[in-house]
Image (cartoon, rainbow, N blue to C red):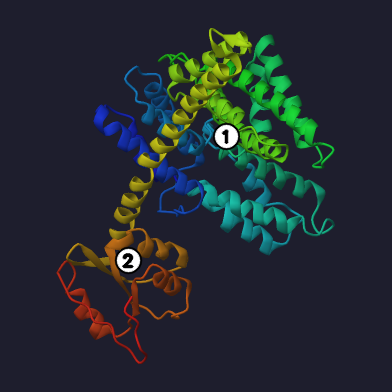
Amino acid sequence: MGTSLEVMCELLVGNLESGDRLEALIFSAIYLKWINTGQIPCFEDGGHPRPNRHAEISRLIFRELERIYCMKDTSLQEVLAIRKIHPCLPSFKAEFTASVPLTRIRDVAHWGDIPHDLKLQIKHTIQNKLHRNAGPEDLVATEAMLARITRNPEEYSEAFVEQFKIIHHELKDFSMLRNLTEQLESIKESFDDRSLSALTLFLECKERLDNLEESKDALDKSIDLLLKTAQSLNALREVIVKGLESSLRNDVPDAAIAMRKKWRLCEIGLEDYSFLLLSRFLNALEAVGGAQQLKENAESKNLGLSGWKPEECTAIGNELLAWKEKGLSEKEGSEDGKAVWALRFKVTLDRSRRLTKEYSEALLQMFPQKVECYVISQYMSSPTVDRWAVGEQILCYLKGAPGDEDRCLWQVTAAGNNIKGVLLLQELPHLSHLGVRAGQEKVIFVTCEDDDKIADIQKLNGKCVRHNTTGNFPVKDL
């Protein structure tokens, strides 16, 4: 992951022209998301960058993102892209920027009262990888090992198990994978009394909501509690957003930058949780008749806190407050007062719906096409892939499908209609996952192991060709 972060740092930390900045941010968000979810695995490359290098680069990237976030000419789309990058950056707390971070795993790998084969497995699957090229897969490996050593409670010493649990917690912290409650607890010390009261109220509401039993009798209680939780969330989020308004000074200490990252992640985490609340709220309301307008109003509030057209969000909120204060009347001039009030309310709701639709459309315009372009460039330039052009179509031959077959599926599906056929230069069952997916995508899929034919095929690289697929069985024209 260290090399990946270095590439991102070179891309983002510099004098990017404003026209190139959005594209750089979008591709960075896509790339980091795939690394974090394991779609792009991190392998050792012969170097030895300890996790503190990851943390230091992450801090540089975070500072640059915050600088861009607070600039006056930053577009709404750039803000959205930045908010997708932040949760994917590793932590740069002091314990991770130390010269020798995450050393507990080394002590555990040499624990005295565990079997030799377990020591070797910890050393080779976790310790060495973590200290040479840390990545999200290290947390997965640690979780698997933790499940193994806790399967039989009496098999390993309590002290050993406890130390391994601490390692697992440290890696979650390094990968910024704490849950929302843990994240909020971690910034409590930086709050003043007023902010602390908002935090406490939200955590209390969230805890009550988490413990609420789902039953018909609890339906009315859940609606009321969901409203209170949403209101307390908005109040807390306003506090955090207010604290993040000012840009970072050049002389700000590293500890303050690390705390600001925590605040930023809490604010983004609250945004994510707000949509979970809205979904539950909508489900509860539909059970008693529905109230879509309340959901849309809440969405507008949270979009404004996320930096999406805050002036419009404020205007919608002010309109709703104005209609509330004006209240219902029997007559407004010669018109029915209730009808006039309903029409005003409908106009505001339509305005709210347009706002949320614009937000969704902006996300859809930003990411899907860039995802497709990135996958094509990443895998069509892979050393395992070559291609021929057929008009505007592509025939590609894969030199192998090593290890994870799912990675090869990208090479078939990413380019969509551009891929006309796939030739795999190794044996593979026709009912394999890759073969089935090729059929689903209506792409001709052929395997070949004949060295002479392969040599002839490789001479066609980059040329326009016509293909004709045959075999010992009928081939359906896909």
Q: Residue at x 68, y 31 (%)?
A: 181
Side of 80 relative to 393 (left or right): right
Residue tagged 2: 384
Query: Label 1: few (<14), some or many (≥20) within 10 Å?
Result: few
**Which dot marks residue 363?**
none
Q: Nearer the viewer, mark 2 or mark 1?
A: 1
Marked residue nearer the N-terminal end (2 or 1): 1
User: Which of the pair 8/272 is nearer the observer?
Assistant: 272
Residue tagged 1: 272
Q: Quadrant of residue 240?
A: top right
Circles 2 and 1 in contact, beta carbons < 8 Å: no
| Residue 401 visible, this angle | no
Q: Quadrant of residue 247?
A: top left
Spot occupied by residue 219 in the image (x, y as percentages of width and height): 78, 36
User: Which of the pair 471/357 is nearer the observer?
Assistant: 357
Q: Is residue 89 above or below residue 203?
A: below
Spot occupied by residue 348 in the image (x, y as percentages of width and height): 50, 22
Q: Quadrant of residue 189?
A: top right
